[in-house]
Amino acid sequence: MMALTAGIGGGLVSGAVVQFIFGDSLIDVGNNNYLSKSLARATLPWYGIDFGNGLPNGRFSNGRTVSDIVGDMMGLPRPPAFLDPAVNEDVILASGLNYASGGAGILNETSSFFIQRLSLYKQIELFQGTQTIIGRKIGGEAAQKFFKEARYVVSLGSNDFINNFLMPLSSNSWSYGADKFSDYLMSTLDSQLRLLYLLGARKLMFFGLGPMGCIPLQRFLSSSGECRESTNQLALDFNKKARGLIEGLSASLTGAAFSYGDAYDIVSDIIASPLKYGFNETYEPCCTLGRIRPTFICTPLSSLCKDRSKYVFWDEYHPRTAPTKSSPSPSPASSESPPSKPLCRSLADPHPSPSKSLKVNDVGKM
């Protein structure tokens, strides 16, 4: 994953600048741990083994997420999970927040079988609530400046294919062809990014999809054991449209500096030429139940590979990340029982719903 982020992070940031992060399990740092009915939670060993104290912390990997790495490269503090009970106004002002949720999609209905997850629309709605809290703390004018100076990361879309369009009983697969479904995602994403702009997002990075057809689960399900090129083509088509969308928004929205982070080419090259990057295993995940596959998630019953540094993937879905000798302490998120009344918890409805108090058309009025 270090290779993935090379050249993406940009220069160091000085001053009190924070991040607000939106996305799925690739950058979730613990929100799903506090969704009691969610079936997508990273609460068990061996998740987090190479991060901080080595205990599960809500990240769906052994170590840092891509947003952790990019933030570290830019000298930005790591934002805690929105639902973390330790979050208060001072924490938000010092570190920002991470709203990402395992299973999240651009579409509200994506990953419905996980029962609870925060869709992108829901994450944006929660961000709006955060702005109200900070406005009361420091005043409206100061809050507006704070949110406009922040950095924003949005990274999701794979669940809309893997856990929606490609599912056998998905209504979307019956209603749309692949190209039309991708257009539907772009139309929805366009509205969502405009809402974030309306809420103050000016410096925003959107990460495109990696080669979804090469994750261990997809390769296991293929008859040959090779990457599923039809699934990879969905990612390529999505990325082409997403890049155009991001460039168009950056050019048309006053003051916007939106950028696109490519994840596809570098991951594809790692899988095609693993030895060049120090890997030798691109098919098997590091954390498995031996020959029993697919195991979907890593559990205490799982066995770990002998040399984690040689594996590209941690589990059936997620990449492995390199440990660091001096990683900052993990965010306060943990697998402990959620508290009764954390600051942000009252804003979170576990059932995803569109943001209703903002309208995309309002963007033109700014």
Image: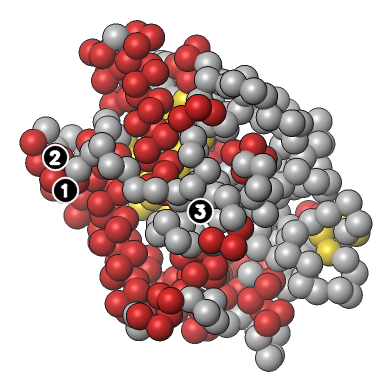
Q: Residue furthest top?
A: 138
Label 3 – label 1 distance at C-alpha: 28 Å
Please give the label number shown on residue 104: 3
**Side of 198 where 189 appears, left or right:** right
Of 349 and 272, nearer the camera is 349
Residue picked out by circle 2:
362
Of 194 and 113, nearer the camera is 113
Label 1 – label 2 distance at C-alpha: 18 Å
First in residue order: circle 3 vs circle 1: 3
First in residue order: circle 2 vs circle 3: 3
- Say which amino acid is labelled 1: Ala
User: Which residue is depicted at the point 50% across and 27% down?
Assistant: 346
**Side of 196 where 122 appears, left or right:** right
Q: Is residue 154 visible?
A: no
Image coordinates of residue 3 in percent, x first then y, are 58, 53
Image coordinates of residue 294 in percent, x first then y, are 76, 72
**Side of 257 where 50 appears, left or right:** right
Residue picked out by circle 1:
251
Q: Residues within 10 Å of mark 2 (few under 14, many from 20)?
A: few
Q: Answer yes or no: do the residues labelled 1 and 2 have beta carbons within 8 Å? A: no
- Say which amino acid is labelled 3: Ala
**Side of 147 where 325 appears, left or right:** right
Q: Residues within 10 Å of mark 3 (few under 14, many from 20)?
A: many
Q: Nearer the viewer, mark 1 or mark 2?
A: 2
Q: Quadrant of the C terminus?
A: top left
Kindly indicate the quadrant of the structure image that contains residue 176: bottom left
